[in-house]
Image (tube, rainbow, N blue to C red):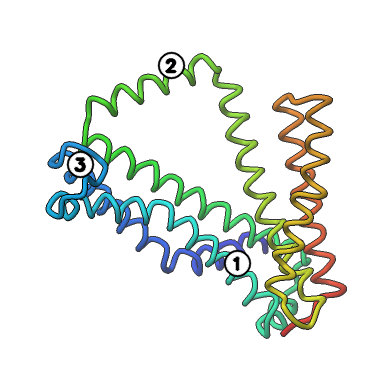
Amino acid sequence: MLGKLLRHEFKALLRFIPVLYLALLGLAVAAGVSGRTTGNWGPNGHTLNLLKQSPIILYSILLFGQFVVNLGIVIQRFRDNFLKDEGYLMFTLPVPEWKLAASKAIAALCVFLLTGAAAVLSLLICGFIGDSGNMQEALSVLWVRLSATGPDRVIFGIATVLVGIFQQLCLIYASMTASQLVPRFRGLVGFGVYAVVMFVVEEPITRAVFSLNNSPVVIFFLEAAFAALYLWCVSWLLKHTFNLE
């Protein structure tokens, strides 16, 4: 059943987001050509040069803006499916609440990974078109550093980042669900719950654990423990105390 939930979620999330990917890749090509023709990457105040560099400006805005758009879509999907009228239909499914929440978080994580891959690909396209020599040099330096770090540590570091993103998504969902306990100002309350948990609860615990042992293994399992805790909170709140709009 979890697989069916994931397929449904991917179908809904990827209805609009691929358009951003295509726009990003197109602007990456235009920005690379613009950087090659102008000879620099920063506006110098001249109208003609600014017009030539407008693809670079638009590309930079979309490069970072797509992550904001993704986050907005992910939040809206959770709110509409669980915390509004559609929630009555969702909870008639023969699926535990934690699987419903987990399907949202897993699908959102995959979408962010796709967006990150699109961003990296666009940067490579833009860099090679704009200045292939500098791009090759930068990639060579990066490869040397990754080789010195070791494949095991690199893989484990990537896994830790992925678990950290999943943990943050679960925290956002838990904060949104907890905000349903109040009748008004739910958006503000949700943001407050997120801030309190993040900076008053999680950060001191993380610092205390790091002071004892900051090995990658400890960091990974600490992030995983927080993710499991937040996912349980979402499940418990959805099952026992939440209030649909």
- Secondary structure at badge 3 equals helix
Image coordinates of residue 137 in percent, x first then y, are: 31, 21
Query: As drawn, is 151 to the left or to the right of 84?
Result: left
Q: Amino acid at mark 3?
A: Gly
What residue appears at the point 78 percent right and 47 percent down from the top-left corner? Answer: 226
Q: On screen, 148 above or below 100? A: above
- Identify which residue, 144 or 41, lies in the foreground: 41
Residue tagged 3: 35
In this view, the residue in front, 6 or 120, is 120
Q: Residue furthest front?
A: 45
Q: Quadrant of the N terminus?
A: bottom right
Q: Residue at x 62, y 60 (%)?
A: 3
Q: How many marks?
A: 3
Crowding near pointer 1: few (<14 within 10 Å), some, many (20+)? some
Q: Earlier in the sequence, mark 3 or mark 2?
A: 3
Instruction: Locate residue 124 relative to residue 169 in the image: left or right.
Output: left
Mark 2 lies on residue: 144
Q: Which mark is residue 75?
A: 1
Q: Earlier in the sequence, mark 2 or mark 1?
A: 1
Relative to residue 215, is residue 109 drawn left or right?
left
The quadrant the C terminus occupies is: bottom right
- Percent of width and height locating residue 234: 78, 63
The quadrant holding residue 214 is top right
Task: Tell me: residue 49, above or below residue 181.
Answer: above
Dot placed on the residue nearer the N-terminal end, 3 or 1: 3
Badge 3 crowding class, 10 Å Cα cut-off, few under 14, some 14 to 19, many 20 or more, is many
Mark in the foreground, 3 or 2: 3
Instruction: Report helix, strand or loop for mark 1.
Output: helix
Please name which of the two marks, 3 or 1, marks the residue nearer to the observer: 3
Q: Which quadrant of the view contains residue 143?
A: top left
